[in-house]
Image (cartoon, grey):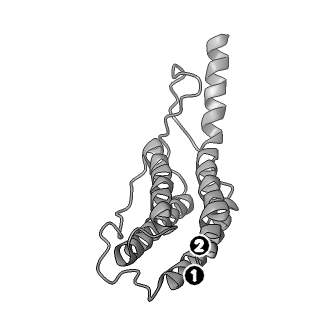
Amino acid sequence: MLRHLHFTVVALTCLATLGCSDDATAPVGATTYTQVIAPTLKAALDTTLFDEWHAEAVYTAVVRDFGAVLPFANIITAEQRHSASLLNIYATRGLAVPANPYAAVPPGFGSFASITAACAAGAEAEVANLALYDRYLAMNPPTDIRFVWENNRRASLEQHYPAFTRCR
C-alpha cells in the first residue's frame, strides 16, 4: 500500500514537472528528468541565458574601459549568478547548453562614451530584461524554471535597474 502511494506521488510529481524517471524507488522529492521539454520552453531558456550572458559581457566591457566602477563591477557578479541558476536548470533537466557567444569580450564590444551613457544603457537593458522575463513567465513554466526566472527578474527590478538609474 505504501509503495503504491509512493509510486502515485512520484507519478503525479512527474506529470506536474513535465516528466521524470518512472523509478518508484527514487527518494521522495528526488526528481530525475528524462523527457525533453517543449521546444518553445527550451528556446525561452536559451534566450534568457543569452540575455544574462550578454549583460555580463557588456558590463565586463564597461569595467574594461572605465575600471572597476560601480554598479557595473557588482552587477557582473550578479549576472554570473543569474547564468549559473539557469545553467543549473539545464543540468537538472539534461538539456544541451548552447554555446556562449559572449565568452570572449572583443575590443570595442559594449563601448560607451561615458559612464553616464553606460548607466543609461544598463537601465534600458534591465527594462528589456524585465519584459523578457514577463513574456516568458506568462508561458506558465514548470516550477523550477518559474522560480529561477522570478528570482532573476526580481533582482533586475529591485537591484539592477535602481542602481543604473542612480548612477546616471
Q: Quick check: marks 1 and 2 in contact, CB under 8 Å?
A: yes
- At 47% from the left edge and 40% from the top edge, which residue is drawn? 34
- At 41% from the left edge and 80% from the top edge, which residue is drawn? 110
Question: Which residue was labeled with disc 1?
Answer: 120
Check disc 1 and report its element: helix, strand or loop: helix
Camera-side residue of 90 and 13: 90
Where is residue 17 shown, x and y percent of the image?
61, 42
Return the disc, 1 or 2, that comes first in the chain's sequence.
1
Q: Amino acid at mark 2?
A: Phe
Q: Which mark is residue 45?
A: none
Asked if residue 49 can be seen in this view, the reply is: no
Res. 76 image quadrant: bottom left
Camera-side residue of 116 and 37: 116
Question: Which residue was labeled with disc 2?
Answer: 164
- Viewport quadrant of the N terminus: top right
Camera-side residue of 109 and 43: 109
Check disc 2 and report its element: helix, strand or loop: helix
Q: Amino acid at mark 1?
A: Ala
- At 64% from the left edge and 34% from the top edge, which residue is drawn? 13
Where is residue 132 shown, x and y percent of the image?
61, 69
- Cα separation, mark 1 vs mark 2, equals 7 Å
Q: Is residue 120 left or right of residue 65?
A: right
The outermost residue toward the bottom is: 113
